[in-house]
Amino acid sequence: MDYNRTFKSITPDSALKTLVFTHIALLAFQMLFAIIAFAQTTRMYFGVMNMDDQFVFIAPVLALGGFFGGYLIFKKQKYVLSEKENIQERLTGYQSVLITRFVLIQGPAIFAIVAYILSGNIFFLFITGVMSAYFIFLRPTREKIESDLRFSFDSPMIHQLEHEEIN
């Protein structure tokens, strides 16, 4: 596979569109799954101190691990990527690390939904809600990409890249 050719097909606008689509799809799946789980559950209660339920301990730990793990991985890789000269390499790496961050947030949220289905404890939907709110906050925007990768969508280098893409 010719990786150089793959890199040439990525522009800042196409990377942003891909990230926005991925973000919306992951968020929609998460929300739809939570709504269906809530609608299908007949026995519900709220209990944080239920010592018989092992999920009460596991779900918050996974949520915190996903939050901090995603943050630390993203922060480290963002710095590494911003130092690269090739814009396509930056954008490809940025897509990968941001999707990894999304998955590290979504995974614990999905686990919490499954824990809710198994136990009926609304506490797990609360965890899902918090993770979903944070997930929404991570929505990729042009400004975030420019800030994270330290370049401008309007720079001459980007316009030249897009011009090469057309030819």
Image: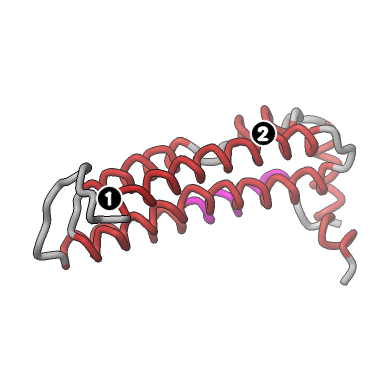
Q: In this view, does 1 lie to the left or right of 120?
A: right
Quadrant housing residue 18: bottom right
Say whether residue 73 is left or right of residue 9: left
Residue nearest the viewer, comparing 23 with 164: 23
Q: Nearer the viewer, residue 152 or 123?
A: 123
Q: Which residue shows up at 67% across the image and 46% down it? A: 13
Residue at figure coordinates x 21%, y 61% from the top left:
119
Image spot of residue 144 (x, y percent)? 61, 32
Name the residue furthest front: 51
The span shown in magenta is 12-23
| Helix, strand or loop for the magenta stretch, by majority | helix
Helix, strand or loop at label 1? It is: helix
**Residue named by callout 1:** 124
Q: Mark 2 points at which residue?
A: 75
Residue 22 is a magenta residue: yes
Q: How far apart in space, not on screen, are marks 2 and 1 (Cα)?
A: 28 Å
Quarter holding the C terminus?
bottom right
Left or right of 144? Residue 4 is right
What x and y, as percent, mark residue 38?
A: 19, 59
Residue type for callout 1: Phe
Most extreme residue toward the bottom is: 1
- State the quadrant of the N terminus: bottom right
Relative to 103, residue 5 above or below: below
The number of numbered badges drawn on the structure is 2
Viewer-proximal residue among 159 and 74: 74
In the rendered structure, which amino acid carries the disc numbered 2?
Lys
Write the residue at 37% across / 39% down.
133
Residue 22 percent across, percent down from the top left: 53, 55
The image quadrant of residue 53 is bottom left
